[in-house]
Image (cartoon, rainbow, N blue to C red):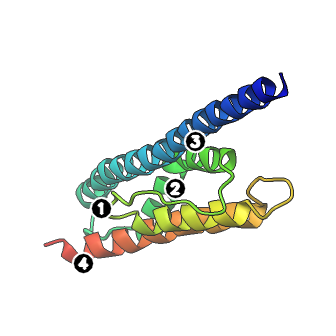
Amino acid sequence: MGLYIGLGLLIAFVILGILGNNIDKKEIQEILTDIQKLEALYTDFVEQKISHHIINSSNGEIDVPTIHKEILIYLKPHIDSIINHMNRLNFSSVNIPNKSLRFNNVTSTAELLIINKAKNEDKQLSAKQIEIFIKSVSDTVYSDLQERILRLP
């Protein structure tokens, strides 16, 4: 009888492990999807903003700090979504496939923060970790804006 109970517990443990692993993979996929969506939204928005500034500027100058600030405000809900997905994971090791052209540092920052978060007692990203993630996005946006402006004719 004890053998059947042990076997039943083992099977239940394996099934729960498989289900848990699938949930974690889904969260990683959602983080990747959110980062790709963040990049697509950013690309569309920045191209429109730069065109708008060129058309409406009397001297043709582009106000990078203003565009940067507007982009970060626009992307804030999507950044928060990525942070929420990161908070759901509890890995000591994670690999988010990097399928981003502009936001590849954001993917690696997310991986690092998820791993570091697993060491926290409350298992949530700290305010400092969230600040690091947002800074990673902000730095990427600013860098890309500078590059786009250099390539303008």
Question: Between marks 2 and 4, how big is the CA–CA gap?
Answer: 21 Å
Element under disc 1: loop
Mark drawn on residue 150: 4
Between circles 1 and 4, the one closer to the viewer is 4
Is 9 located above or below residue 71 in the figure? above
Question: Between marks 3 and 4, how big is the CA–CA gap?
Answer: 45 Å
Question: Between marks 1 and 3, how big is the CA–CA gap?
Answer: 53 Å
Mark 3 Cα shell of 10 Å, populated few (<14), some (14-19), many (≥20): few
Residue at image coords 29%, 59%: 50
Between circles 2 and 1, the one closer to the viewer is 2
Upstream in sequence: badge 1 or badge 3: 3
Question: In this view of the protein, which residue sits in the foreground, 118 or 153?
Answer: 118
Query: Where residue 52 sits: x, y (%)?
Result: 29, 52
Residue at image coords 44%, 49%: 32
The residue under label 2 is 72
The residue under label 1 is 57
Upstream in sequence: badge 2 or badge 4: 2
Mark 4 Cα shell of 10 Å, populated few (<14), some (14-19), many (≥20): few
Q: Amino acid at mark 4?
A: Leu
Query: Where residue 54 sits: x, y (%)?
Result: 25, 61
Query: Where residue 150 sits: x, y (%)?
Result: 24, 78
Residue at image coords 34%, 55%: 46
The residue under label 3 is 21
Question: Between marks 2 and 1, how big is the CA–CA gap?
Answer: 22 Å
Between circles 1 and 3, the one closer to the viewer is 3
Upstream in sequence: badge 1 or badge 4: 1
